[in-house]
Image (tube, grey):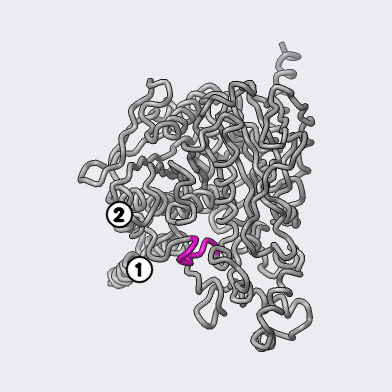
Amino acid sequence: MDGGRRADGAVRAARIGGRMCAFVLAFSACGGPPPPPEPAKADAASRRSLGAAEITGFTGAYGNHAWLGLRYARAPRGELRFRGPQLLAPPAGAQQALAFGSPCPQYAHPFGVDAAKQGTPVGDEDCLFLNVYAPVLSAEQAATTRLPVMVWFHGGSNVIGHAGGYDGGNLARRERVIVVTANYRLGPLGWFRHASLRAGASPEEASGNYGTLDQIAVLRWVRSHIAAFGGDAGNVTIFGESAGARDVLALLIAPPARGLFHRAIAQSGSMRPQDARVAEVFASEGGHASSANEVIARLLVADGKAKDAAAARAALQKMQPGQIATYVRGKAPTQLLAVYGKTDDERLSALPNVFSDGVVISEGDPLALLARPDAHASVPVMLGTNRDENKTFMMTDPKHVRRFTPLYTRMRDPDHYDALAAALSLSWKVSGADAPASALATSGSDVYVYRFDWDEEPSLLGADYGVLLGAGHGLEIPFVFGHFVFGPRSGFLFPEETKATRQQLAQAMMGYWAEFARRGRPGSGRGGALPRWEAFGAGEGAQHFMVFDTVQGGGVRLAQGSVDMSAVIASVLSDARLPDARARCSVLREVMRSSAYDRAAREKVDATCKQLKLANAD
């Protein structure tokens, strides 16, 4: 009996230890990277003809076919840096597509490229590759089959991430769709707008939206080649999460993308294209702190060509446009990244991206554009957010938690933590779902809204991660892909004991996503057995949204209602977890700093906080 207990205890200790290591890797990047996967073996049954090219892939982990590392454009380096992507036809002859192409230049990060120490520069400018996942079909079947195509754009603030982090095999096999994941240029190599780069550039290239143009190039490649894999070029859904969702929403108001996609899914995004002028001019002229002029000035200082910022600005004004263009094209990616600095978690610091330039991205208030049927791609749209979006960031922020070790974490003030997370996440629901959905519904578009509520993470060392993290940012992705294996980082968040209910929820979500891709409406999923997902309407009482959770959390169910910034403010003012005016105003101001909002909301917060402070003084 005692021996059995000791053995059971050893098993439990090993299991907990594995989860601890996984959790640290997920949020602290301790330890080394996971061992590389076994090399894929070419499968002759996956051979496909793309013009004069013969592409052979392999059979993936889910009994699917996969083709990795397909180049869709020339390497954008040298004279091709800060230019639009140059599409390439697959080269003639036989080739194997068994490994991912290089990520684009970025800093290594647990949520991006995690095969190097966090904060280390990684990637290569020769990075414009995509991957294709499909159900197993013979070459003859693929030639006559036309399955819906789902093109995924990864998240990561448009500064980290790569397509290789997402296995589309299970979604493709189970739902009989073609899944495409793609790299696109990131950071200053993806979005950089300066007058010196406009000489000889097309109007699209002159925008500086190179990352957006890469995404459009992916869609053009899909239109030309996806039939060889069994895909329907006339039924393409773009979908993405976080920055990828923001890019999806931007493509709705991107004239060059019209006709290249037919549905759109935005998971935890927002409508925030940035002013093109702000991305270019000096900060003293109203520009961004990391505008192109500011960055070039920093490069001049770093090179010893100017002693300080003022001298660099004077030197820059004397340089000819051709000299400036040659100068920035001659810098190594690491040199460009270095002058932006890093955030607290070792990723590239904030920079302007996705510019409203009037050519690639339409100018004007993005919500107003969505409300006009002539100003956006009138396609069915699905939008949603996670109930606890901001907890993903708060749970490692020393302002909100004490981390005695990477695993021994305690909230500084549990009431304030939950109140702030609720307000921030509700604000994200406004900007990422309800506001754009309301605008689209007004325009007559078919639009569907969801909220993801799953929060069944385990407890460890006295900390309940269902509370600390909950339904945090990004946690819906494994459910959409039906793929919970992300190396060692997945073991803690998704333990074996939750497998059955997780898979049930994942199957429901995959079914809805694929049915939306197939028909432009999620309905009751592919099999028709799920609750019917009603559209988010424009009339009073018509704002339906689907809640996604396991049976323990109430199940998959249709709910009703929407929120705006006034409702967010009211929720903070009535939150009993906030003891006084100071606490309420602290949360309101954090909401204003961290979320997309309009001027009226900011003015209301300022006025409200002023009144609260006066009342508190009385």
Residue underneath mark 1 = 599
Say which residue appears at 74% left-offset and 18% top-offset. 7
* Residue 460 vs residue 165, the one in the foreground: 165
The image shows a total of numbered marks equal to: 2
Say which residue appears at 60% left-offset and 38% top-offset. 225
- Residue type (three-letter) at the residue carrying disc 2: Ala
Figure check: 376 above or below 310? above
Is any part of residue 479 visible from this angle?
no
Q: In which quarter of the image is residue 144?
A: top right
Say which residue appears at 57% left-offset and 66% top-offset. 202
Q: Is residue 354 magenta?
A: yes
Frontmost of labels 1 and 2 is 1
Magenta: predominant secondary structure element?
loop
Question: Pointer 2: residues within 10 angstroms few (<14), some, or many (20+)?
Answer: some
- Residue type (three-letter) at the residue carrying disc 1: Arg
* Residue 64 vs residue 112, the one in the foreground: 64
Q: Quadrant of residue 107?
A: bottom right
Q: How far apart are marks 1 and 2 (CA)?
A: 16 Å
Figure check: 339 above or below 147? below
- Asked if residue 366 lies left or right of residue 36, the reply is left
Is any part of residue 403 visible from this angle?
yes
**Image location of residue 504, percent across then percent down:** 49, 23
Region of the chain picked out in magenta, as a range: 353-360
Instruction: Tell which residue pokes out farthest to the top in this image.
Output: 1
Figure check: 252 above or below 9? below
Name the quadrant of the N terminus.
top right
Residue underneath mark 2 = 567
* Residue 205 vs residue 516, the one in the foreground: 205
* First in sequence: mark 1 vs mark 2: 2
- Asked if residue 102 lies left or right of residue 420, the reply is right
Instruction: Tell which residue pokes out farthest to the left in this image.
Output: 540
